[in-house]
Amino acid sequence: MLDLVLTQTLNGLASASSLFLVACGLSIIFGVTRIVNFAHGSLYMLGGYLAFTLVTWLGPADPLGFWGGVILAVLLTGLAGVLIEALILRRIYQAPELFQLLATFGVVLMLQDIALATWGPEDKLGPRAPGFRSFVILFDNRFPSYELFLIAVGPVVLGLIWLLFHRTRWGVLIRAATQDREMVSALGVNQRLLFTSVFAFGAALAGLGGALQLPREAINLHMDLSMIAEAFVVVVVGGLGSVTGAYLAAVLIGVLHAFGILILPKITLVLVFLVMAAVLIVRPHGLLGKAAVEPRGHAGQLFLLRPADGAAKAFGAVALGLLVLAPLVVPDHVVLTLTDLVIFAVFAASLHLLMGPGGITSFGHAAYFGLGAYGAALAVKWLGSPMEEALMLAPLMAGIAGAIFGWFCVRLSGVYLAMLTLAFAQIAWATAFQWVDLTGGDNGILGVWPSAWAVPKMAFYYLALAIAVLVIAALRIIIFAPFGYALRAGRDSPLRAEAIGLDVGRLQWAAFVIAAIAAGIAGGLFAFSKGSVFPTYMAIPRSVDALLMVLLGGVQTVAGPVIGAFAYMGLNEQLMKLTAYWRFVLGLSIVLLVVLFPRGLVGTWLYWRARRESAAQAAATA
C-alpha cells in the first residue's frame, strides 16, 4: 500500500511540474498584460512539435543533440510569442479585454492548421531523454528516472523565477506592472517593450513545458486545448499573477488527479474543475491571489446600449422579412442552415444579457444550452412527451441550473467569475458524459424528433424563427426595462448602485436565470432540429462559440449578438465546405475582424456613424 501511495504521489508531482511550466507563463502574461491568452496551449503544442523536429534532426541519441533541440525549441517558441504580440495583440491593447481574448482564439485556430500542414495528423512519438532512459527502484517498484527529473524541474524553475523577479530590474518591473501597470507606464517605463518581453518569456515557458513532454507522451494536434483548460484552472486556483500560487495549485491538482484515477475514476474528467469550484467558493481570489487594481478610467461608455433608431429598426424589419421569405426560394439544405443560425442567434442573445447589461463574462454558457437540449430529449425519451411539452421542459431545466450555478458565481467577479462558470459547465458536461444509464454517455440520445406537423423542414424553420423573434424581443424589453437599467448601474458602479439601494448580487443572479432560460430554449430547439443530443453540446468549444458570436457582433449593442451569430456560424459552415484548412482561414478572419473592427461589426458601424454625425454637427456649428 505504501509503495502505491508513493508511486502515485510521484506521478502527480511529475505531472504538476509540466502543468506548472505552462500555467506559470500564462499567469505572468495575464498579470502584466491582462490578456486571457487562449493561444497559450497552442504555444505548448508548438514547443512539443518543434522539439520533435529539432531533436530528430540533431540526433536523439546524442545528449547534445537532444537537449540542444529542446533549448532551440524553447527559444523558437518564445520568438513565436514575440510575433503574436507584435503583429496582433499590440494593435488591440486599447480594445476591450474580451476582444483580445477573441484575437488569441483566432491564433489558436491558425496554429492548429499550421501544425496540421507542417507535421500532419499523426501523433509524433519522441525518443527517450539521454541520461534518463533507465529507472530507479522505489519500494520494489520501478519508477522512470525521467519522471524524477521532471519533479525536480518545477521547484528549480520556481526558484529561478523568484530570483529573476526579486533580483533584477526587469523582474521588479513585472511585479510592479502586475499590481498597477498604468502607474508603471506613468513612471516612464517602455510599456510596449515590457509587454513584448513578458509575452516572449511566457511563451518560452509554455514551449519548455511542451518540449519536455517529448519523452513522456505523443505530440498531437489536440494537446493544446486539453492543456489550456487545466492551465487556466491552475492559474485561477493559485491566484492570478502569483507564480508561487501557480506552483502550489499545480501540485494540488496533479496529486489529486493521480489519486483520483485510483479512488474515484468516474469523476476524473471533472476533478480539476471540482477543485477549482471549491477553492473559488472559499477563497474568491485563489490560494495566493489578491484583488486586482481596477484600471483608471472606466470603459462603461462602450456599453451604453441605446435603443435602436429609425434606420436600425428599418434594417431589422427588412432582415426579418428576408428570413421569412427565404424558405420559399432557397433549397432545403439552406433552410436547415438558416434554422441553425436562427437558433444560435437566440443562444448568443442570451449570453449578451450577461455580458452587455450585466458586465459578466461567462466561459461556460453552453451548460444551459446543453441542459435545455437534454431537458427536451429526456422528456421525449423517458416521459414520452410530445415536442410541445418537451420544449417547455427545456428552459425549466436550464433555468434551475442557472439559479444554482448563478448563486455561487455572482459572489465573484472578473476572470474568477468566468472560470467558475467554466467549472460548472464542465461538471454538467462530465455528468452527461458519464451518466450513461440516463443520458447515453457519448452515444447521446437519439430519436428526438419534432411533432408530425413540424417535421417538414420549412415548418420547423418557421417555428424556430417565431420562437427566436419572441425570445430576442423579450430580452430586448428586459434590457430597456428598469431591471435592465439597474443591472447596468451595478455593472458600471457597484458601490454607487448599492448606496442607492440596489441589490447588485440579486440583480446579477436574476440575469443568470433569465439568460439560462433563453439559452435552454435555444438548446431545446437545437435538439429537435438535429434529432439527437450529445454531451458536446455542453463542451468548452460550444461556450467559445457563444463568446465569439457576441464579441464579433458587438457586446455594446442589442443587435450585435444576432448579427454576430449569423456572421460567425455562417462563415464557419461555408469555410468547412471550401477548404480542409478552414480553421486557419477562420482564425485569420477573426483576427482581421478584431483588428479592423475592435468594437465588433455593429459596434464599429455605430461608432463610425456617431463620429460622422459629430463631425457634421461641428461643421454646421462652425
Image: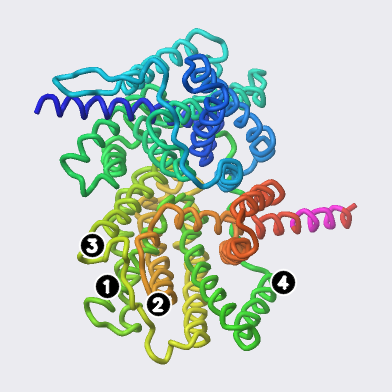
Residue 244 magenta-drawn?
A: no
Q: Do we see residue 104 in this rendering?
A: no
Q: Which residue is mark 4?
A: 311
Residue visible at 47% across and 78% down in the picture: 467
Circle 2 is placed at which residue position?
528
How packed is label 1: few (under 14 Cα within 10 Å), some, or many (20 or more)? many
- Foreground: disc 4 or disc 2: 2
* Mark 4 vs 3: CB contact within 8 A: no
First in sequence: mark 1 or mark 2?
A: 1
Q: Amino acid at mark 4?
A: Ala
Mark 1 and mark 3: Cα distance apart in space: 13 Å
Q: CA distance from mark 1 to mark 4?
A: 44 Å
Label 3: how many residues lie within 10 Å, few (<14), some (14-19) or many (20+)?
Answer: few
Q: Nearer the viewer, mark 2 or mark 3?
A: 3
Q: Is residue 144 left or right of residue 587?
A: left
Which of the marked residues, 4 or 2, is nearer the chain's N terminus? 4
CA–CA distance between discs 4 and 3?
A: 52 Å
**611 with respect to 530 (left or right):** right
Above or below, comparing residue 1 to residue 100 in the picture: above
